[in-house]
Image (spheres, rainbow, N blue to C red):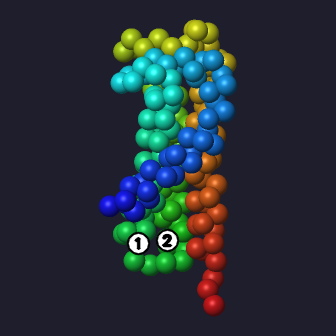
Amino acid sequence: MFDTLAFVFTPGIVASILWSPILLIGRFRSLFDRLPPARSMIASYLLVAVGLSLPFVIGTGFVFATMSMGGAGLSNALLNVVFLLTIAYVIVLPLVAGVGLPRIGLDWDPADYGVGTWLLLVGAMVWYAAVFVIPLAFFAFVLALPTG
C-alpha cells in the first residue's frame, strides 16, 4: 500500500518543488490564496501541484499496464499520452484559471486578466508539463532503441 502511494504522489511532490518559483509572481500567489477548499496559498498550491501530476502518473501507469509489447510500441504509446496531456494542460488549464474561475466567483487577478496574465498562465503550464514531458520523452526514446 505504501509503495502504491509513493508511486502515485512522489512525482507530484517533486513537481511541486520544481514548479514552486511561480509563487514568486504575485498573480499566482493571489490565485492559490483564493482557491478552495483550504483558502491557504501553500495548501492550495500543494493540492494543485500534486493533483496536476495525477494524469501523468495514471497515464504512464496505464500505458505500462496495458502494453504487452515493449520497444517502439511502448515508446509510441507513452509519447501519445504525454503529447495529449501536454496539449490539454497548455490549452485547457489556462482557460479554466482565466475564464472559468472568475465566472464562478473566484476573481484572483489584480491585473484584470490581461495579456500578461494569459502569458503567465500558459508559461506556467508549459513549465509544469515540461517537468513530466522531459523525463518521459527521454525514457520513451530509450525504450525505442533497438536491443541487442
Element under disc 1: loop
Give the residue at mark 1. 67
Residue 147 is left or right of residue 52, and the answer is: right
Residue 105 spot, x, y in % from top left: 39, 11
Give the residue type at disc 2. Answer: Leu
Where is residue 10 drawn, in percent x and y? 49, 52
Per the image, label 2 sits on a secondary structure element best described as helix
Q: Residue furthest bottom?
A: 148
Q: Residue at x 58, y 59 (%)?
A: 136
Q: Earlier in the sequence, mark 1 or mark 2?
A: 1
Image quadrant holding the N terminus, namely bottom left
At 60% from the left and 66% from the top, the residue drawn is 139
Residue 142 % position (x, y): 63, 72
Horizontal side, residue 100 vs residue 42: left or right: left
The answer to whether residue 111 shows anywhere in this view is yes
Q: For the residues marked 1 and 2, what is the alpha-carbon distance in whole angstroms? A: 6 Å
Point out residue 123 in the picture as x, y percentages from the top left corner: 65, 33
Residue shown at the point (38%, 55%) measured from the top left = 5
Marks 1 and 2: CB-CB under 8 Å?
Answer: yes
Q: Is residue 30 left or right of residue 40?
A: right
Q: Nearer the viewer, residue 67 or 33?
A: 33
Mark carried by residue 74: 2
Most extreme residue toward the front is 2
